[in-house]
């Protein structure tokens, strides 16, 4: 079980390398001043794909989603139990391969 502590830590954070030790190449700004310079970040292909999905041009038909929500709320959504059963069986068969 995880315990979440909502009390903020008063320990200042420092740049750390792979083993948690301060990175030898990291530059720290003097207290009270912001670091100057620039940093370059390279995003993974997965991160780039997620950014593309966030631009609002997804393949989700929002009008269809709204229509389905209304049909569910009104109790008028037709349910094809055979299709659901076939899908469950196909998923189980795929897991057993």
Image (spheres, helix red, strand yellow):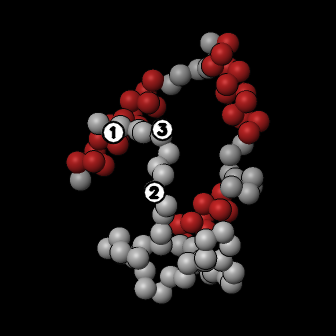
* Circle 3 residue: 6
Image coordinates for residue 56, horizontal then vertical, percent: 75, 52
**Mark 1 burial class by Cα count in 10 Å: few <14, some 14-19, many 20+:** few
Picture residue at 74% right of the left edge, 39% below the top: 62
- Height in image: 70 above or below 65? above
- The numbered dot on residue 11 is 2
Q: Residue at x 67, y 25 (%)?
A: 69
> 93 left or right of 52?
left
Which residue appears farthest toward the left when viewing the image?
A: 96
Tally of numbered discs = 3
* Residue 86 sits in quarter: top left
User: Which labelled disc corresponds to residue 2?
Assistant: 1
Callout 1: helix, strand or loop?
loop
Instruction: Identify the image quadrant of residue 33.
Output: bottom right
Q: Which mark is first along the chain, 1 or 2?
A: 1
Looking at the image, is 72 positioned above or below residue 28? above
Q: Is residue 15 above or below residue 40?
A: above
The image position of residue 58, as x and y in percent, is 70, 53
Q: CA distance from mark 1 to mark 3?
A: 13 Å
Residue positioned 23% across, 53% down in the render: 97
Crowd band around label 2 with a 10 angstrom C-alpha radius: few (<14), some (14–19), many (20+): few
Alpha carbon distance from label 3 to label 2: 15 Å
Measured from the top left, where is residue 55 in percent x and y?
Answer: 74, 57
Give the side of residue 14 with respect to residue 29, left or right: left
Element on which disc 3 rests: loop
The N terminus lies in quadrant:
top left
Q: CA distance from mark 2 to mark 1?
A: 21 Å
């Amino acid at each position: 079980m995880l315990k979440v502590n909502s009390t903020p830590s008063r320990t200042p954070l420092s740049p750390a390398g792979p083993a948690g030790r301060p990175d030898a190449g990291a530059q720290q700004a003097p207290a009270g001043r912001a670091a100057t310079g620039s940093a370059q970040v390279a995003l993974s292909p997965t991160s780039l794909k997620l950014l593309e999905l966030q631009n609002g041009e997804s393949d989700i038909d929002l009008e269809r989603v709204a229509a389905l929500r209304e049909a569910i709320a009104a109790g008028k959504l037709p349910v094809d139990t055979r299709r659901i059963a076939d899908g469950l069986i196909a998923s189980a068969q795929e897991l057993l391969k």
